């Protein structure tokens, strides 16, 4: 089955497009920015879940194709497509200064800084956690691109709420965050105090490093405070997404739970 493809507007500027697969990721786009969807590929089993949106596609002359698994695997280059793939415009990327300054400076706000975390599945899980705790930007040290299909699928729709901002390796982005009024809070297995020993500051950048090596020494030395997540000590560390969930949950408890 195929519906007519919308004709592009003459002389319209090119907007980067990308593949987004996964039920929750695609439903988030359909709900928040349906006009950015350019084409849809969907397995027959997913038609009921996307029925109202596909009706809208037909009305607006956006092409959708009902296809089988083998075609979806070819299109997405993955077996983890969950029966649906959107070709959609990318969300416009934002820069570091926008990420630091776009909310009211008098209200509590937390951002996440990742040093050396490049695995898209870890990044997607972290973005999902950030969306849950209203962290609207992740500063990704050394990352070249702000999105990928695997990250968006793993984020389960969180990528529509959270900006991933690639920033340069090194201390420069953290210096900028401090100048913008944020305290830098690093996590480490041998942190100087327990995460629960005192409230986290109301404007904070939480710094997490890759699971194998943690934060680079130069970044760790930038921290205003270094905290550790208390536990049994049976293992050296948590998965980076789990660590993010614990720390961001504590920030929410301290500053946002009563709102």
Image: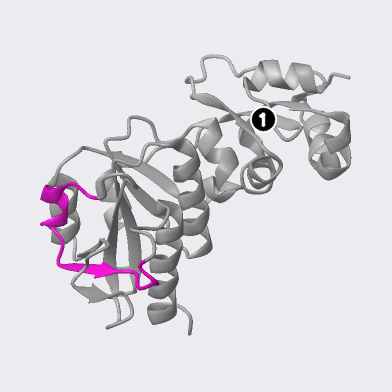
Could you tell me how many numbered marks the image carries? 1
Q: Which residue is mark 1?
A: 86
**190 left or right of 8 in image:** left
Q: Give the x, y percent position of residue 112.
A: 34, 56
Quadrant for residue 109, please give it: bottom left
Quadrant for residue 72, please give it: top right
Can residue 103 be seen here? The reply is: no
Q: Is residue 162 above or below residue 170?
A: below
Q: Which residue is more in the foreground, 103 or 203? A: 203
The answer to whether residue 222 is magenta is yes
Can residue 53 be seen here? The reply is: yes
**71 left or right of 231 in image:** right
Residue found 46% across the figure and 37% down from its top = 120
The answer to whether residue 51 is magenta is no
Residue found 54% across the figure and 25% down from its top = 17
**122 left or right of 179 in image:** right
Q: Give the x, y percent position of residue 44.
A: 88, 30
The coloring applied to the image is one colour
Magenta extent: 215-233
Quadrant for residue 104, please give it: bottom left
Residue found 86% across the figure and 40% down from its top = 51
Of helix, strand and loop, which one carries label 1? strand
Q: Give the x, y percent position of residue 226.
A: 20, 67
């Amino acid at each position: 089955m195929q519906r007519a493809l919308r004709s592009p507007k003459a002389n319209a500027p090119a907007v980067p497009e990308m593949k987004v697969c996964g039920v929750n990721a695609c439903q988030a786009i359909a709900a928040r920015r349906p006009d950015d969807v350019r084409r849809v590929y969907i397995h027959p089993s997913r038609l009921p879940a996307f029925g109202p949106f596909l009706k809208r596609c037909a009305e607006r002359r956006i092409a959708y194709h009902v296809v089988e698994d083998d075609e979806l695997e070819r299109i997405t280059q993955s077996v983890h497509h969950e029966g649906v793939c959107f070709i959609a415009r990318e969300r416009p990327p934002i820069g570091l200064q926008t990420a630091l300054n776009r909310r009211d400076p008098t209200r509590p706000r937390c951002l996440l800084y990742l040093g050396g975390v490049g695995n898209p599945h870890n990044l997607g899980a972290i973005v999902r956690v950030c969306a849950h705790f209203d962290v609207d930007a992740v500063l990704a040290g050394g990352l070249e691109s702000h999105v990928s299909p695997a990250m968006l699928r793993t984020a389960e729709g969180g990528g529509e709420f959270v900006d991933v901002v690639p920033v340069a390796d090194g201390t420069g982005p953290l210096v900028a965050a401090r100048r913008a009024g944020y305290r830098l809070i690093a996590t480490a297995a041998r942190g100087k105090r327990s995460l629960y020993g005192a409230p986290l500051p109301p404007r904070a950048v939480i710094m997490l490093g890759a699971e194998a090596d943690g934060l680079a020494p130069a970044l760790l030395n930038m921290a205003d405070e270094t905290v550790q997540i208390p536990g049994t000590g049976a293992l050296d560390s948590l998965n980076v997404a789990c660590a993010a969930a614990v720390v961001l949950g504590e920030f929410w408890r301290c500053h946002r739970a009563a709102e």
